[in-house]
Image (tube, rainbow, N blue to C red):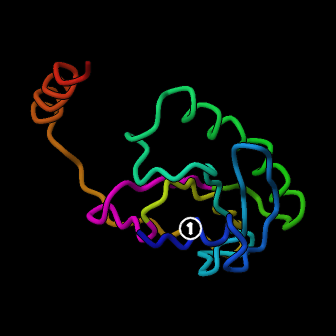
Amino acid sequence: MECIFCDILSGKREGHIIYEDDLHVSFLDKYPIDTGHSLVIPREHHEKITDMDSIAVGQMFSLVPKIATGILSATGADAFSLGQNNGRAAKQIIPHVHVHIIPRYNHKGTIWTKRSIEKDDDLLRLAEKIKNSIT
């Protein structure tokens, strides 16, 4: 299977790397939402975060504050958002686990997708169903 991120890791494709260690690499997103938008990926290929064990997930996410702090310092951003998509329906374009760190700027504003307000009874039933499905 061809993976753009694995190609970046192997040097077959160029990536603007901002951080790396033995297990992870972080680089600028080629199609950024805003200036400084970066990705954190594990070196080991996993398509979805549910394919990783909890220790590997924790190790990857533990890098986010360090990398985000560097991005904020370098770009002068006021804040940041995180994104982590799993599967095509969630708009995961590259099938290799990655965390988006998206700098946000007060003078530009932040766009979010349309949201709706659910009824309390519906939320209660859904919460109970999810709670019973977590193993």
Q: Nearer the viewer, residue 54 or 77?
A: 54
Residue 36 sits above or below residue 119 on the image: below
Residue 13: x and y in percent read 67, 79
Across and down, in percent, residue 75 comes to 84, 67
Name the quadrant containing residue 28. Answer: bottom right
- Residue pointed to by mark 1: 110
Quadrant where the C terminus lies?
top left
State left or right for residue 22 relative to residue 98: right
Q: Nearer the viewer, residue 6 or 60?
A: 6
Query: Extreme right residue here?
Result: 74
> Label 1: few (<14), some or many (≥20) within 10 Å?
few
Q: In this picture, is 2 found above or below 48?
A: below
Give, as a three-letter code, the residue at label 1. Thr
Magenta-colored span: 81-94
x and y percentages locating residue 96 in the rendered image: 48, 59
Q: How many marks on residues? A: 1
